[in-house]
Amino acid sequence: MAELNDDSSATGTARPAAKTPEVSDDFIHRRHTLPSGLGYTTTTGRLVLRREEVKDGKADGFKAKAEIFVVSYVADPTPGAPAANPRPVVFAFNGGPGSSSVWLHMGLLGPRMVDSGDIGNLTPAPYGVVDNPETILEHADLVMIDPVNTGFSRVVEGGTAEEFHAFVEDRDLVAEVIRLWTTRNNRWLSPKYLVGESYGTLRAVAVAKRLFDAYGMSVNGLGLISTVLNLSTLYFQPGNDTPYALHIPTYAAIAHYHGRHRGRELREVVAEAEAFAGREFGYALSQGSRLTAEELDGVVARLSAVTTLDQDFIRRTNLRWTYGEFAAELLRGQGLTVGRIDGRFTQRPDNRQLSENWDDPSLRAINGPYAAAINHYLRAELGYENDLPYEILTGRVQPWSYKTFEGAPVDVSADLERLLAYNPELRVHVDYGYHDGATPHFAAEYVWAHMDLPPEALARFTHHYHEAGHMMYLNPEARRAQLAALAEFVGA
């Protein structure tokens, strides 16, 4: 039925179209107190990022592009402290690409953490949220960042998410979040640290370089957890033999965890595997079909002893297998596959004859607890409401563009070299998990060894090894050691 009081329809005059409401930040603030007595404020919500637009050579406004979900933790000021707060600030994010910050947020850094348990003692559903007695908030303020299409972060209505699903655009977006938060909170004079995990370590180095180049902002430290700065050290591709050698010590460590190096210490097994991978095996891979039959027999025997894989499997794969093939093969005789994110975890595959396994039992074990924890915590304890799904680990960011590196490896180690040269006080904290099949420790060590750094720069690195996987903080002992080292790092 027509509206009788619609004057515009009667006169034939077109009514102006209703404007889309301008998006704005939707932050919620809450007061809290740590068990230690430290008071702090959380600010939870979506920060609107705007970009200066130019059209036909003329300024065309400061237009909203994306709403980035951020959770910040700021401790109450110390009585008598200067207005320019000298307390350190840690900016943290995970990787993927496609991962939200939930893992570092509720597994390691935040004041509240998921009750997930660990291998052999997993907490059953519906899980829980508990205090984190070693939270980094005791030593520094904390800002957790979710890139576009992770967590609650999205592009604005009418925007295109794909433009942010790329190395450079993602780097610039995260750098802008950090610049804007630092400026709005008057924290330019606070020590600043970037902590990333997995692809987030590559992002952390790139973002630190962007902050320096674009805004003149120097960071004091980089926390690199489960590190990858050069993706060619991880990707199994024809013509690139490097990853096959760099995974060998991780295969040996995982085999050791599952009782296949009985009577030996883990570090002894790993050291033997590293020596073999870096010498004889590297040589054998470089020779290809030029290996004599006798040389091949010797390499196969040594590979079998180090990894505990069957010699027939090693021959069939021509000394080269992917992690997925290893995951399917190691415990095949027991009807089990092992995890990639954390090789300590196992499960029965749906097909016991499969040749390659990417159905990761470690992710299957921890997705539920972390999803329950973050969805409860944000609403019930931080007071933030949003009907969007909180994207924990999503494929919505794929395909991810590395067009900047077309024809070259995706590698930011040169950026880190320059940062260490520009800033002689920059320090780097590195965490490795021996059972991490996603970012093997030997691959990260390979990158450090191939960087052009003087001894004084190398002395600014600290290296920490844990008997755990990619999310080494699943292991309570590793988490406590990791946080103790990070506390010293940001407090130095």
Image (cartoon, rainbow, N blue to C red):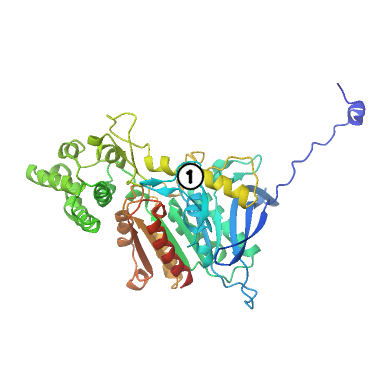
200 sits left or right of 237 in the view = right
- Is residue 98 at least partly visible in the picture? no
Q: 146 or 401, which lies in front?
A: 146
The quarter of the picture where residue 327 lies is top left
* Front residue of 386 and 454: 386
Q: Which residue is mark 1?
A: 369
Q: Is residue 279 left or right of residue 234?
A: left
Q: Position of residue 445 (x, y in %)?
A: 31, 59
Left or right of 343 in this view: 64:
right
Question: Does residue 54 appear in this view?
Answer: yes
Q: Quadrant of the N terminus?
A: top right
Query: Which quadrant would residue 236 be assigned to in this image?
Result: top left
Q: Which of 69/406 is in front?
A: 69
| Residue 207 spot, x, y in % from top left | 50, 58
Q: Residue at x 51, y 50 (%)?
A: 102
Q: Amino acid at mark 1?
A: Pro
Q: Tell me if 386 is positioned left or right of 109 in this view.
A: right
Q: Secondary structure at mark 1?
A: helix
Horizontal and vertical percent position of residue 354: 29, 31
